[in-house]
Image (cartoon, helix red, strand yellow):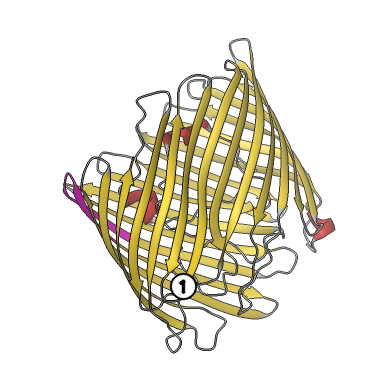
Amino acid sequence: MILKTISQKPSRLVCLLLFPGIASISYAGPWEINPLVEARIGYSDNVEFESNDDEESGFIGQLNPGVSIQKNEGRLLVQLDYLMQNFYYLDDDDLSTNQKLDSIARYEFIPQTFFLNGYANISQVLVDSNQGISVNNINNTGNTTDQRTLGIEPVWVQKLGTYAQANLAYLYAVQGFEDESDEEGVGGDIDDNDRQRFLASLGNQDVENDRLDWALRYSNEKVDFEDGEEFDFSAQLIELGYSISPRLQVVGTYGYENNDFGDVVSIDEDEDGTFWDVGIIYGFGEFTALEVRRGERFFGKTWEADLTVGGPKLQVNANYEEITNLEVLDSINSDGFDAPENLLQNDVNTNVTNDRNSVSISKIWDGTIAYTVSKSTFAFNVTNTDVEFLDSNDTQKYASYAFGWLWNITGISSLFTSVEELENESFNNGVDVETSLLDFEITYVRQLSAKTDFDVSYVYSEGDSGLDDDGDFTSNTVSVGLIHNF
């Protein structure tokens, strides 16, 4: 697909692959409502990730209530995971609260025809990626803010006979940030915005079994930022796929796009015009496939590749893509009902640019390997993103490397170890800034009862905050906690 949105979630092994599902949900009944509470006490010798000359130690207490709500039967589907994180810094007598919400709902007005989708999300993101970076909410760096997203999407699906199917969808989403600078002037260009998209498509119904897959698509999108900048872009395209053999399929896309990027930013390329890509999809087995595409768009040549390997012990996923970063959020997908988030992880989105209201091009590499043997699972992840802003020719680069090991000691206890390194380099207004963070974590989890878990963890962090002359810092943090599901 030529129109995509850049993911707002970082590739972190801790929350994506290995960490035990502490807040699990039972799907036995039509409605499942599971409240939970997390109590924790920790100590850090550098609470705010200050430079080594200014570090301050302290105790950190947490009392975090939450709830998981699930309904996956009937015409109404609901999944909601909410956690209120309350951090109390005992030495400074300071209270910090973060909201974490991941919710999705779908109501089927007319069976298999008319749906109304909705979602709401609250997460923490960096304010300025050139300042001190923390991958969790525990260390009070003053460099995170809440990102709130709310969306609604009516969808009409109309079957035309036994072969073709038409789809109409309209998505409206609002996105807001608590953009507050701290006393040291940490701030960023974070604009609230609203986004709209209309999609229409016509294609064959059975894309898995028909030898010829085809689809005609039209999209019209608008992104309106609070500072007054507004972007409009649309595309008309045709997608084709033909199965040469049960394992090999030839695919291609051809279309025309209109946008007003050139009215807002200074770019040399002709932003209107045709685009295309061609490629192949080859299946090596039931769970292994490779897709490669080559194309062109207004900003130049494009490549896209995706490799998936599945098996009882080995899982591999590697992909590369080149995209613009202004498209509206993804359509709401019912697949999300099968994968609840583990909101007990204190993750912060570190893969966010300073400028959130400019047209940019991203080249994204991402790869994950996970291998399970006996009671252990080993995983490795690497991510690299190159971003170029079309209005200023500024650039930004992100890279992360992570290794994790999960050892299921017994049926009620496990040990998790991970090492993760984040690197960020930006070139803005002639200034080159580099930041980095290395995190080592070891966590022991034991189930005390059917509803209560105990854990103890140690985290070592070291990094460079980039802009400061003496921005190097180190931190040691230990914590113990209880999580109880009611």
Which residues make up the magenta segment?
403-417
Q: In this view, does 136 lie to the left or right of 207?
A: left
Please, is residue 47 above or below residue 485 in the view?
A: below
Judged from this view, the residue extending furthest toward the right is: 263
Asked if residue 385 shows in the view, the reply is yes
Residue at screen point 63% across, 43% down: 150
**Label 1 is placed on what type of residue?**
Asp
Position of residue 387 measured from the top left corner of the image (x, y, whole percent) = 61, 63
- Of residues 88 and 207, the one drawn nearer to the viewer in this rendering: 88
Q: Position of residue 456 (x, y in %)?
A: 26, 61
In x, y percent, where is residue 298? 73, 52
Which residue is under mark 1? 93
Which sits in the foreground, 323 or 57? 57
Which residue is situated farthest in the top direction here? Answer: 161
Q: Quadrant of the N terminus?
A: top right
The residue depicted at 37 percent of the width and 62 percent of the height is 402
Residue 368 visible: no
Label count reads: 1
Which corner quadrant holds the C terminus? top left
Where does residue 63 sit, x and y in percent of width and height?
40, 56
Tell me where residue 39 sits by quadrant: bottom left
Instruction: Provide the secondary structure element on which disc 1 rests.
Output: loop
